[in-house]
Amino acid sequence: MQPILVFIETSDGQLRKTSLEALSEAKRIGRNINVEVIALIIGDKIASFANELSSYGADKVLVAEGGDFKDYNTAKYTRALLTAVNKTNPTALFLSATPSGKDLSASISAELKLSALQDCISISYENGVFTVRRPVYAGKAIITVRALKTPAIITLRPKVFAVGVPENKNVSVGNLQVALTADDQRVGLKETVVTAQKKVELTEADIIVSGGRGMKAGENFKVIEELAQVLNAAVGASRAAVDSGWRPHTDQVGQTGKTVCPTLYIACGISGAIQHLAGMSSSKWIVAINKDPESPIFKVANYGVVGDLFEVVPALCQELKKPC
Ligand SMILES: Cc1cc2nc3c(=O)[nH]c(=O)nc-3n(C[C@H](O)[C@H](O)[C@H](O)COP(=O)(O)OP(=O)(O)OC[C@H]3O[C@@H](n4cnc5c(N)ncnc54)[C@H](O)[C@@H]3O)c2cc1C
């Protein structure tokens, strides 16, 4: 049977955890149905990741390396992925449901004239068919979808699938020769703007402290930042806070922001509109701090504090700072 091909992403010179999640899930399924797992890594100076990829479950590693692939580029990466698909003829293609993974999955789907199954939260393989579960209607329902054609193009929601325990093993590494066309090179990256502060990436954070309109002003987010620092958490925001200019759009959680799945999500001064819940309701534990006991956020919260966040959050911070 044909292999499972996994697209691997790097960030800041490291393999992205979401890619290790996808690789570990491919390994779990691959071992069950006895198919090979091939990791495809695209970039510049990335061949050294091969050993790490093999330890997380790759039976083979394909490397598309060179200056052309230094930065993510839809056309060039699609060409590399298409070359890998043609070379390996996979039964399934796994990508992370990150911005690049979603972009690339859409682009490769168009090339292959297939559908992509986006943002999946479980994957199984039965009777020769991949079946996935994925949230729809802003997280209100979960649908089960079968991929009737191959390769099944599947993006995996970050932080849903566990990263396996690394094993010591050596695998074959192949260089993928990619013939870029003139069309692939039409668009290039002009500038990358890096945020001044090194922050914990929202979609990969284990703990998120978010603020909403209840924060009342941008400068008040310092209480959220302080709590986030104590918990080594990322800071998130509702759209109301972002639209008010208090936080950048990169912090927005929800339907038109990021989908997050942390172990702990603390919502401060957020009412819990359906569009916000769409981005965070799959968090493992939800704590809501809100002065209105009727606020809908309490319907999804595991723990709720009815009170003024400007009293509750600093008090929580003080408690957490105390030595155990
Ligand atoms: C197409 C579309 C897409 C959208 N996408 C998103 C999205 O991606 N993300 C998103 O968040 N929203 C999104 N929205 C907007 C969404 O509908 C809500 O308007 C928004 O989530 C409200 O943000 P909020 O909860 O911060 O504000 P509000 O709904 O105004 O709630 C503020 C809360 O703060 C509480 N509060 C006030 N003061 C205090 C205090 N001192 N202490 C404690 N609590 C206090 C209040 O009781 C209230 O519950 C979208 C809307 C549309 C139409």
Image (cartoon, rainbow, N blue to C red):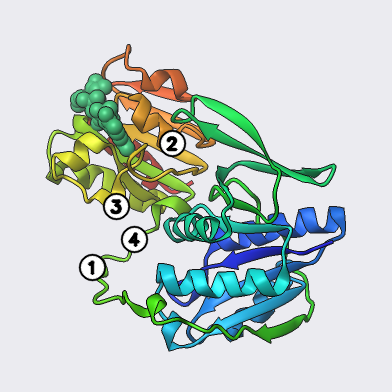
Mark 2 in CB contact with mark 4 (< 8 angstroms): no
Measured in 3D between alpha carbons, the distance from the residue under mark 2 to the one under mark 4, in whole angstroms, is 19 Å
According to the image, label 2 marks what residue? 280
The answer, for residue 261, to whether it is visible in the render is yes
The tag earlier along the polypeptide, 3 or 4, is 4
Characterize the local packing of mark 2: few (<14), some (14-19) or many (20 or more) Cα atoms within 10 angstroms. many
Do we see residue 226 in this rendering?
A: no
In the image, residue 138 sits, relative to residue 257, either above or below, namely above
Mark 3 residue type: Thr
Q: Where's residue 295, x and y in %?
A: 32, 17
Q: Residue 159 or 4: which is nearer the viewer?
A: 4
> What residue lies at 20% left-to-right and 29% top-to-bottom?
214
Disc 4 marks which residue?
199
> What kind of element bears circle 1?
loop
Quadrant showing the N terminus: bottom right
Amino acid on which disc 4 is placed: Lys
Q: In the rendered view, tell whether residue 91 sits above or below residue 128.
A: below
Label 4: state its secondary structure. Answer: loop
Sequence-wise, which precedes: disc 2 or disc 3? 3
Picture mark count: 4
Residue on which the image places disc 3: 250
Marks 1/2 in contact by CB < 8 Å: the verdict is no
Question: Where on the picture, by quarter, is residue 117?
Answer: top right
Amino acid type, residue under disc 2 in the picture:
Met
Q: Which circle's residue, 3 or 1, is located before the other in the chain?
A: 1
Q: Residue 136 in the image: state x and y as whole percent.
A: 50, 31
Q: Is residue 137 above or below residue 169?
A: above
| Earlier residue among tags 1 and 2 | 1
Q: Position of residue 282 (x, y in %)?
A: 51, 35
**Left or right of 177 in this view: 262:** left
Packing grade of label 4 (10 A; few <14, some 14-19, many >=20) is few
The residue labelled by disc 1 is 196
